Image (cartoon, grey):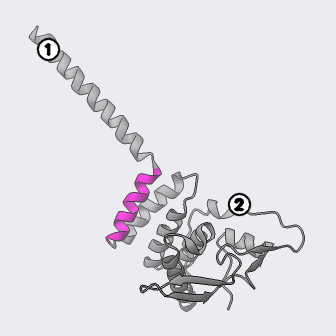
Amino acid sequence: MRQLFISTVFLFILIQNVVGQEKESHLFQDPRRYIDTAVTYMNQEKYLEADKYFMVALDQITVLSADFCYYFGKNSFYLKYYSQSIDWLSKYLELKGSSGQYSDEAIALLDKSEKEFRANRSTGETVETNTKFFYLNTISCSGHESIICPVCKGDDIITTKDRLGDNLYKKCPYSTNGVLTCEEFNLLLQGKLKPKK
C-alpha cells in the first residue's frame, strides 16, 4: 500500500513538472514575452540586452504593432543606430499619426535621430535589421494621385502639447501642403522617406 502511495505521488509530481514545462515553453513562444523583457531592459538603460530581445521578437511576430515600432526605434536611438531609429519611429508615426500615445516622444526622438544621422553620416552605420514589415502595405501607383500624409493627417503641421498643455507646432517633415505623392507614400510605408530640408 505504501509503495502504491509513493508511486502515485511520484507520478503526480512528474506530471506536474511536464505540464509546467509545456506551459513555460509555450509562454516563451509568445513574442510579447520577448518584447516585454526588451522594454524592461530598455527602461533599465541596458540597451544592448534589450536589442537582443527585440531582435528575437522581430523574427517571431507576424503582425506589427505600433508600440513595438516605437520601443524598437527608441532603443535603436540610444544604441546610436540612427538610421534604424528613423525607420522604426517613422513606421510608428505612419501607423499612429500625431495622436498616438507615444507620438510626441516619437517625433522628438525622430528629430534627434535625423540630426545625429546627418552629423554622423561619415561613420558608415550599417545595421541590418529584419525589414519584412517595411515592404508590406505598399500601394500600386497609377497616375499622379496625391495621398493625404498619415503623419500630419493632411494639415502639413504636426501639433503637440508641451508639459504645461500649450500647443506646439512643427511643420511636417514629409508632406508638401499635407499630401504625398504615391511614390513618397510608399517610401514612407517602407521607412525610407527622407525628411524635407
Report whether 75 appears left or right of 147: left
- The picture places residue 113, in percent across and down from the top left corner, at 53, 83
Q: Amino acid at mark 1?
A: Phe
Residue in the picture at 71% in, 60% down: 137
- The picture places residue 50, in percent across and down from the top left corner, at 39, 65
Secondary structure of the residue carrying tag 2 is loop
Q: Residues within 10 Å of mark 1 (few under 14, many from 20)?
A: few
Residue in the picture at 31% in, 35% down: 20
Quadrant, the C terminus: bottom right
Asked which quadrant contains residue 41, the reply is: bottom left
Give me the disc on residue 137. Answer: 2
Instruction: Specify the farthest residue to the top.
Output: 1
Count the marks: how many? Answer: 2
Residue in the picture at 51% in, 86% down: 112
* N-term-proximal mark, 1 vs 2: 1
Discs 1/2, front: 2
Instruction: Specify the farthest residue to the front.
Output: 165
- The picture places residue 29, in percent across and down from the top left corner, at 44, 45
Question: Is residue 66 within the magenta segment?
Answer: no
Residue under pointer 1: 5
Asked which quadrant contains residue 138, the reply is: bottom right
Q: Amino acid at mark 2?
A: Asn
Q: Is residue 73 above or below residue 109?
A: above
Report whether 162 appears left or right of 11: right
Over which residues does the magenta segment extend?
31-44
Q: Is residue 126 visible?
A: no
Secondary structure of the residue carrying tag 1 is helix
Report whether 12 appears left or right of 72: left
Asked which quadrant contains residue 130, the reply is: bottom right
Quadrant, the N terminus: top left
Of 100 and 54, which appears nearest the observer? 100
